[in-house]
Image (cartoon, grey):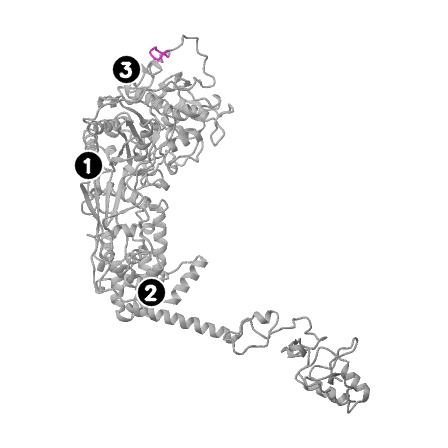
């Protein structure tokens, strides 16, 4: 008989009942003895009452069993699995205990594992919670690795023996379009090192208080400073830079300006070495001598000269705080403004930012006990406004404006920062033709000498000119006139300025929009330039629904002409010829000012220069630059093809080309028929209208005069197929930069676009086109339908008109208010025939017809209100390089 089939011996204590109780662990409905009650290392899941040797377990009485259970850890509380029959491990608490169902094969902790994770012997969330030993071990390992990497990096990176090329700074060389050198300009000649004893203590402490308060305590790198900077930035508060003065000195002196991880690591390790080997005064001296302060000035000595015209040692605490503020970014903290580089960096915005940081730096110096209470009170009393920019060597005449224009173009078409650019080493080839630039300057000087006498006539003072010349179908700027020159204290580039309304030179865009889009009554069909509109003075303007345009006080808005000449209903062609305002204001309303704006924008006018869309928008309240106006008219000259203006053809750095300077892409801005018909109409302006002084050019040309309200500016923009040129004339208050009336200037009752600006244009174009064949313009195809203004009298039946036949208008009476007699009527002819001119201009000026410009708008929201135009520089509003185009 098998040993397992033997009858088990009777228990020694407790009798049969006790034996049955000892064997009832797996019986249904009965409670098993607590695990460990037998003192055996394990309990069985089943009813097997034998141990691994097959012998019967020996139990005592009930009390003994209870005592054994109390001595155990409690089956339901044990977590380690115990061996059972068949090699399996029991769940805690036995088969019916609380551990049942948690998995029969829970692993026993393996003390031989290097990392006990997930943790053996744990269940639920505890299994995934790392032990303190594991966490501390990983932290020690991580920081140990950092120390090892830092040690290796510190050992491998050495302090360079020489300063980098950037710290030495060079010049930039500019070239004319033919490749000959124009000028070498930049910071190479504007850098002087000074010793620490020649730098005022106030300057030293201004930089330390603003940039790195712990400078004299840190070891070259300040981890707490980096953390503090990040925290302050996250809160949006004022912050010192994360880099120490030592790090910035190392970057300026030994490293490139690239933003890369490797450069940052090098900067950190070199800074640590420099911090331990170089004295703090020497580091501070190097930092102040290599930092960029704007205006091409590297180092504190050059900055003191550029901003205050004095030696660094003579700087006052207030001036020191100002210069320290520039280190945050001179593009945005120089009160002179840099809106040609960034349209947000206007003079007004920069001055506001500079004053705020200047005051904050003085406050920090005071809080840090670096200046006394009296010094602080004296310094904070008055903001130390710096002097205007000065002309550097070679930047005289028009060269300064040419370099200014080219520099803006480079910065707007590359990833080169202003600081990098001013370090020098670039070779810039421009589009400027030396002969054209000289011819344009000569034309301005000739007319100024003939007409202006600022020494003897008060109203001839502060008169300025701006001009630009652009190649159609290309966009290259071949010449510009920016002003009297840097050497004469004139730093605003008048060719790339803003704030000077263009007046009636805007009317061609209104006509182009009408020919392309039609009016609300023409059902999408283009309007013919022979359409008639009321040209009388003082007319109410209608909305498309027939109601009148109202002013703010709900009274009707009346559009004025310059004179009260009763033109009656005249063709748009005639209205353009004589620059009559009322037809174009109503035409703009009928076409939609939004369509007029879109046509102008596609032609090359920048978005930032547009005025408010109200009735006066049609008369040139917008303020594009001379460069942009020349470029937009070049679109008409090129039969509707538009190319953005550009001034740089290539940029090289140390002999290697920089990308981004290909010619601009040519687009079809308007239908060819529209552009050619605008040209045909503008040819008539020169032949028979307000631009007759341009006939002295002696070749086929088209153009338009412009004069603004109160005679604050006068323009002439004209072109041939080879060249488009614009000329602006205005007076400006040198203190407020507001435009002044030119009534009485040059001894004339008023200045108009048809006289002085046209004379400058003609003188220049004669020289610029000398020896160039007169190829005329393409023929203008008949365009559009005759869509007279609502209310115009019905035309009488007439025979069909062939191009060679004459179309006549009833002669208008002679203007009643003219300073001199009007010339005899003349015939004005074009593709559409000839028109009888019943009273034109006074002696070749625009008084008889009108170019009188812009009347006050019906609503006060016009951003270029003519009562006090303020001019800006660059492209805050209409400069060539505003926005993505430049």
Mark 3 sits on what residue?
A: 823
Q: Residue at 28% x, 27% y: name it.
A: 719
Q: Which of the two discs, 1 and 3, sits closer to the camera?
A: 1
How busy is the neighbourhood of tag 1: few (under 14 within 10 Å), some, or many (20 plus)?
some
Majority secondary structure of magenta residues: loop
Q: Residue 655: horizontal and vertical position, in percent?
A: 23, 48
Report the residue marked by disc 2: 268
Helix, strand or loop for disc 1? helix
State how far apart marks 1 and 2 are (Cα): 49 Å
Q: Does the magenta stretch include residue 456?
A: no
The answer to whether residue 806 is magenta is: yes
* Image point (74%, 83%), residue name: 4
Q: Is residue 493 above or below residue 796?
A: below
Q: Which of marks 3 and 2 is in front?
A: 2
Q: Name the residue under label 1.
A: 434
Q: How far is disc 1 from disc 3 in space, using C-alphas?
A: 41 Å
Identify the magenta region.
802-808
Q: Position of residue 785 (x, y in %)?
A: 43, 18
- Taking the image as shown, residue 199 lies to the left or right of residue 89, namely left
Q: Estimate the x, y position of residue 533 in percent, counting from the top left.
A: 42, 19
The answer for how far apart the CA atoms under marks 3 and 2 are is 81 Å
* Quadrant (top left, top right, bottom left, bottom right) of the C terminus: top left
Question: Would you say residue 356 is visible in this rendering?
Answer: yes
């Amino acid at each position: 008989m098998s040993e397992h089939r033997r009858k088990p011996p009777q228990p020694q204590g407790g009798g049969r009942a006790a034996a049955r109780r000892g064997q009832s662990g797996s019986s249904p409905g009965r409670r098993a003895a607590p695990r460990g009650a037998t003192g055996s290392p394990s309990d069985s899941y089943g009813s097997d009452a034998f141990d691994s040797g097959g012998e019967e377990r020996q139990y005592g009485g009930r009390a003994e069993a209870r005592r054994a259970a109390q001595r155990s850890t409690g089956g339901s509380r044990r977590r380690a699995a115990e061996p059972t029959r068949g090699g399996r491990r029991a769940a805690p608490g036995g088969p019916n205990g609380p551990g049942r169902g948690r998995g029969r094969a829970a692993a026993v902790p393996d003390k031989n594992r290097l990392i006990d994770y997930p943790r053996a012997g744990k269940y639920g969330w505890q299994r995934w919670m790392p032990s303190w030993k594991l966490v501390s071990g990983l932290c020690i390992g991580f920081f140990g690795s950092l120390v090892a990497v830092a040690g290796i990096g510190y050992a491998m990176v050495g302090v360079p023996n020489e300063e980098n090329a950037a710290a030495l700074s060079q010049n930039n060389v500019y070239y004319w379009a033919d490749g000959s050198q124009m000028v070498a300009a930049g910071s190479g000649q504007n850098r002087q090192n000074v010793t620490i004893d020649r730098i005022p203590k106030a300057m030293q402490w201004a930089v330390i208080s603003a940039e790195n308060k712990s400078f004299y305590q840190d070891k070259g790198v300040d981890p707490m400073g980096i953390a503090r900077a990040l925290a302050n930035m996250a809160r949006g508060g004022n912050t010192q830079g994360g880099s120490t003065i030592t790090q910035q000195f190392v970057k300026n002196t030994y490293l490139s300006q690239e933003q890369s991880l490797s450069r940052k690591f090098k900067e950190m390790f070199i800074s640590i070495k420099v911090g331990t080997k170089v004295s703090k005064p020497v580091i501070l001296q190097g930092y102040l001598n290599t930092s960029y302060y704007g205006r091409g000035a590297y180092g504190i000595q050059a900055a003191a000269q550029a901003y205050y015209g004095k030696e660094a040692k003579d700087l006052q605490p207030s001036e020191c705080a100002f210069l320290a503020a520039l280190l945050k970014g001179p593009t945005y903290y120089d009160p002179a403004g840099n809106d040609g580089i960034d349209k947000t960096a206007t003079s007004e915005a920069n001055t506001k930012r500079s004053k705020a940081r200047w005051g904050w730096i003085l406050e920090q110096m005071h809080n840090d006990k670096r200046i006394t209470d009296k010094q602080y009170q004296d310094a904070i009393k008055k903001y130390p406004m710096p002097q205007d920019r000065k002309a550097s060597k070679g930047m005289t005449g028009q060269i300064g404006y040419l370099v200014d224009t080219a520099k803006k173009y480079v910065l707007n078409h590359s990833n080169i920062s202003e600081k990098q650019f001013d370090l020098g080493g670039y070779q810039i080839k421009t589009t400027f033709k030396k002969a054209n630039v000289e011819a344009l300057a000569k034309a301005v000087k000739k007319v100024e000498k003939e007409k202006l006498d600022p020494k003897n006539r008060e109203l001839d003072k502060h008169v300025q000119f701006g001009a630009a010349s652009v190649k159609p179908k290309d966009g290259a700027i071949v010449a510009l006139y920016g002003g009297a020159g840097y050497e004469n204290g004139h730093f605003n580039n008048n060719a790339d300025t803003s704030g000077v309304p263009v007046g009636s030179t805007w009317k061609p865009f209104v006509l182009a929009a009408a020919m392309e889009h039609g009016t609300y009554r023409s059902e999408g069909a283009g309007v013919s330039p022979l359409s008639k509109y009321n040209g009388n003075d003082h007319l109410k303007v209608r909305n498309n629904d027939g109601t009148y345009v109202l002013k703010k006080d709900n009274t009707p808005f009346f559009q004025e002409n310059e004179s009260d000449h009763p033109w009656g209903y005249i063709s748009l062609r005639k209205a353009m010829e004589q620059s009559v305002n009322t037809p174009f204001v109503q035409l703009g309303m009928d076409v939609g000012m939004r369509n007029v704006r879109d046509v102008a924008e596609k032609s090359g006018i920048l978005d930032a220069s547009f005025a408010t869309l109200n009735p006066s928008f049609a008369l040139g309240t917008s303020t594009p630059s001379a460069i942009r106006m020349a470029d937009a008219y070049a679109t008409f000259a090129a039969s509707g093809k538009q190319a953005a203006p550009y001034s740089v053809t290539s940029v090289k750095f140390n002999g290697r080309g920089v990308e981004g300077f290909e010619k601009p892409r040519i687009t079809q801005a308007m239908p060819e028929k529209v552009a050619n018909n605008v040209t045909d109409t503008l040819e008539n302006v020169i032949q028979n209208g307000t631009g007759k002084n341009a006939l002295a050019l002696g070749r086929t040309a088209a153009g338009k005069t412009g004069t603004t309200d109160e005679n604050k500016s006068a323009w002439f923009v004209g072109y041939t197929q080879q060249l488009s040129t614009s000329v602006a004339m205005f007076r400006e208050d040198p203190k407020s930069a507001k435009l002044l009336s030119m009534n009485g200037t040059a001894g004339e009752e008023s200045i108009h676009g048809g006289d002085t600006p046209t004379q400058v244009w003609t003188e220049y174009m004669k020289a610029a086109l000398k020896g160039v064949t007169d190829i005329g313009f393409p023929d203008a195809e008949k365009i559009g339908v005759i869509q007279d203004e609502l209310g115009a009298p019905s035309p009488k039946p007439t025979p069909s008109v062939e191009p060679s036949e004459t179309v006549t208008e009833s002669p208008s009476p002679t203007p009643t208010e003219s300073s001199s007699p009007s010339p005899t009527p003349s015939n004005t002819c074009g593709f559409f025939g000839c028109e009888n001119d019943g009273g034109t201009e006074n002696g070749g000026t625009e008084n008889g017809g009108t170019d009188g410009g812009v009347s006050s708008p019906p609503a006060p929201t016009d951003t270029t209100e003519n009562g006090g135009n303020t001019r800006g520089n660059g492209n805050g509003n209409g400069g060539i390089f505003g926005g993505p185009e430049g």
